[in-house]
Image: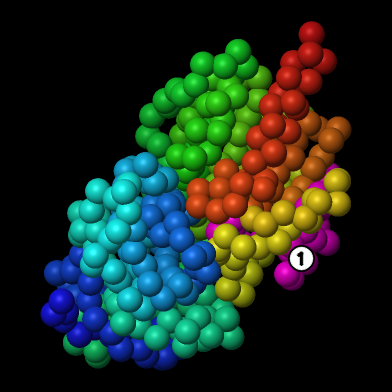
Amino acid sequence: MNRVPATLVLSDGAQFEGYAAGFLPRSGVTTGEFVFNTALSGYQETITDPSYAGQIIAFTYPHIGNYGVTPLDEEAGRPWCSGVVVRELSDLPSNWRSVGPLEGFLVQHRVPAIVGIDTRRLTRHLRRYGALPGAFGHADPAAVAAAARVAVGTDGTDLVSQVTTRETYQRGDGSRHVVALDYGIKTTMVHQLARRFRVSVVPATMDADAIRALAPDGLFLSNGPGDPGALDAQVQVLDDLVGTLPIFGICLGHQLLARSLGATTYKLPFGHHGSNHPVKDLMTGRVEITAQNHNYAVAADSLGRSEVSHVNLNDGVVEGLTATALGCFSVQYHPEAGPGPHDARYLFDRFEALVNDGITESH
């Protein structure tokens, strides 16, 4: 396939050469915060994960698109990432589930890509200097470099307001009712909840009184993009609800619950993005392999009314919190596993037991 030459430039001046692919914006330039993902498969789930809003995903696996795309693997109605970086983009998918090639999917959803990049070098650079804003595109390299110099990251940015649902919707028909606050919720999370509960997925802007008016038996806090430190309004809502009903948070939901319980958050150098992170459950001693996608984490020395329940065995980052007396817990990683191993899906069963116990106690 004949492709147009393209350039990738990070905000610190590092430059890479490649070719334009996917959707070609008229300006010829795409900006965002560059992060790398180490998963070996699940590229469609990754690209459609709303937690990547404002970011450009660099895949470390060299061949992307091998098995095509299918609506069954979409984690949202559309991709929210700003762009995609790959070494080699397959134009000949081979899988019985495939309905078309990945590049066609990118074009359809207006997602720019750059291919032929030395992703090893790019990943090493991001590991050394951290997640960096930058730009790529088929415009004049000087224009791409100029855009990279003024590109911004996710620090201090509320991206949740972009990705949250605009209207409440329901899934499942269980006897217990759970409200899920949509900070950027993934479809697989909704599926896991709907297998156990009657679920009302509500906008992230819903206040505590409106949530109480729905008479939930439990509250779920979803994943989502951006800086948890920029979401004071969402934390205030949780301040009003913590201790009044069972709560389970994942990823950004974990960070916001932690803030409500008195903890603080900080930005990791290059984040955790992949499907192979070992985590230890301190309650059981069990080690599980987890899927992760986050740039921010909870500071271990600021836990407030909670205690650590899970830790990352690679770097010691807090991966889970619990506040038993208040009936809430959370994890930083993704137990729904879309994509990823299913080791941690027991956490949805733990939430179901908490909801049932809470209802029993209240009666």
Q: In this view of the protein, can residue 347 be seen by the observer?
A: yes
- In the foreground, 362 or 161: 362
Residue 189 % position (x, y): 53, 39
Inspect the magenta stretch and tell me whether residue 362 lies in it: no
**Rendered view: 244 above or below 275:** above
Name the amino acid type tagged 1: Leu
How would you rate the neighbour count of disc 1 (Cα within 10 Å): few for under 14, some for 14-19, many for 20 or more? some
Q: Is 56 rendered above or below residue 347?
A: below
The image shows residue 189, relative to residue 17, as above or below, that is above
- Name which residue lies at 24% across and 89% down: 141
Residue position marked by numbered label 1 in the rendering: 313
* Residue 341 x %, y %: 59, 52
- The scheme the figure's colours follow is rainbow
Q: Nearer the viewer, residue 92 or 147?
A: 92
Q: Is residue 233 visible?
A: no
Residue 294 x %, y %: 57, 60
Q: Where on the picture, by quarter, is residue 4?
A: bottom left
> In the drawing, does residue 139 fall left or right of residue 180?
left
Q: Secondary structure at mark 1?
A: loop
Residue shown at 49% from the left, 40% from the top: 188
Q: Quadrant of the N terminus?
A: bottom left
Q: How many marks?
A: 1
Residue 261 picture quarter? top right
Q: Nearer the viewer, residue 160 or 272?
A: 272
Q: Residue furthest top?
A: 363
For residue 81, side relative to residue 40 (left or right): left
Q: Tell me what residue is drawn at x 28 percent, y 84 percent.
A: 18
- The structure residue drawn at horizontal position 67% and vertical position 48%, both measured from the top left corner, is 343
Quadrant for the C terminus in the image: top right
Query: In the rendering, at what x and y percent does residue 144 appear?
Result: 27, 83
Queried whether the magenta region covers residue 298, the answer comes back as yes
What's drawn in magenta, residue-wise?
Answer: 291-318
